[in-house]
Amino acid sequence: MSVFKDKRFIWIGLGVISLLIKQLTGVFPELTERVYSRGIFVGFRYLFDYTLALIPIPLFYIFFIIVIYWLSIKVIRFIRNPNAVPLPKRLWSALLTFVAIAGGLLFVFYWSWGYNYDRIKVEQQLGLTTTKPTQEQLQSMISQEVQLAIQTRNQIGGADSTALTDQQLLVKTTPDIRPLLTKVLDQKGYPTPGRVKVVRLFPKGILMRMGISGIYFPFVGEGHVDGAVHLLDQPFTLAHEMAHGFGFGDEATCNFWAYLTCLSSDEAAMKYIAHFNYLEYLLVTLKRADKQNYTAVYQALPTGIRNDLIAKKKHNAQYPDLIPMSMFNDAYLKSQGVKEGVLSYSRVVLLVEAYRNRK
């Protein structure tokens, strides 16, 4: 078959072109921001939200059912080989098909969302100056956040020194989170096109057993949160994945928007969830720097907050990692230009403190 007639070469070519453009978007973030993130991507956002997003069930399931069905058909045809095609030719055709699929996936991934990794960094857009805190500064930041967390926790009806119950924590869904996030982004000068959809996945643990609590799936333009995520994390994770949907690739940036989103709520439980999640990142940062000092700080936490941390840890222990996805996630993030890999999540500490200092 002629190269010009075999459509697989078209998809391979589109994948290669997309990779080449990826090299340019990283060099010219201002152009990426203007042309892609605030232009081409906006079109894809509307396209997804007013077509596929109208389907009432999570598209994550539909996508993988289609993929498994298609692969099954291909494997069966390869094994049966009704036309008795020579094995070398069949293997070459299978390899070509695999590369074409990879090219097609790269093309869809980058053009529908992936180039957002190279947009102008949020600290540059907002005029924030980020600096790595010293251990003394970090401890001071933790003390401040503990006081804020206690203040908001005490405003939750029935809160005492025991872990907060499901009844005391508000169950937030996409319709609740979206207006809070869009208001925050609008105030900072970012477009909020469409109506990003984030859904919960079941059975519980389907994502957490892979070491993640949520994922944005660019091939369907939809965010997903594990149905087992603890209520102390659920609104924060929903806002994080929704921020991905609005065009932010960087994990720390999405944590930053999630923090501001939960904090912008009028409800005490939402504000506490903001401070609780941010406090966790502060504690993780201290633990990496000085484990012994972290232990002392952790033991000194107010009983209520410490019991919430313990309750969340026990809850998550029900869904231990079965597939070590953290290594693959780390490699993926680094391939997109995120030098810190999975450690980039904790960079939210720099963004929040820079934001507070500017204010």
Image (cartoon, helix red, strand yellow):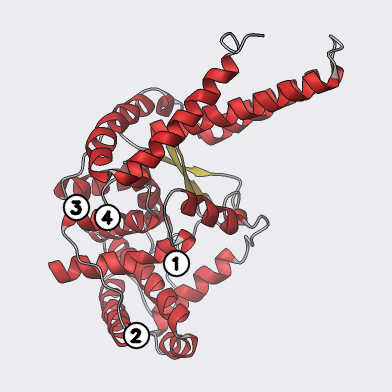
The quarter of the displayed image where residue 154 is located = bottom left
**Residue 280 percent across, percent down from the top left:** 41, 72
Which residue position holds label 4? 261
Mark found first going from the N terminus, 2 or 4: 2
* Nearer mark to the viewer, of 1 and 2: 2
Packing grade of label 2 (10 A; few <14, some 14-19, many >=20) is some
Disc 4 to disc 3, C-alpha distance: 18 Å
Residue type marked 3 = Gln
Left or right relative to 313: residue 270? left
Mark found first going from the N terminus, 4 or 1: 1
Which residue position holds label 3? 125
**Closest to the observer: 357 or 177?**
357
Residue type marked 1 = Thr
Disc 1 to disc 3, C-alpha distance: 39 Å
Asked if labels 1 and 4 touch by Cβ distance under 8 angstroms, the answer is no
Q: Secondary structure at mark 3?
A: helix
- Residue 325 to residue 308: above or below: above
Whether residue 232 is visible here, answered yes or no, is no
**Closest to the observer: 77 or 319?**
77
* Nearer mark to the viewer, of 4 and 1: 4
Mark found first going from the N terminus, 4 or 3: 3
Which residue position holds label 2? 135
Which residue position holds label 1? 165
Q: Secondary structure at mark 4?
A: helix
**Residue 301 percent across, percent down from the top left:** 39, 85
Residue type marked 4 = Thr
Left or right relative to 149: residue 8? right
| Residue drawn at x 64%, y 58% as measured from the top left | 324
Packing grade of label 3 (10 A; few <14, some 14-19, many >=20) is few
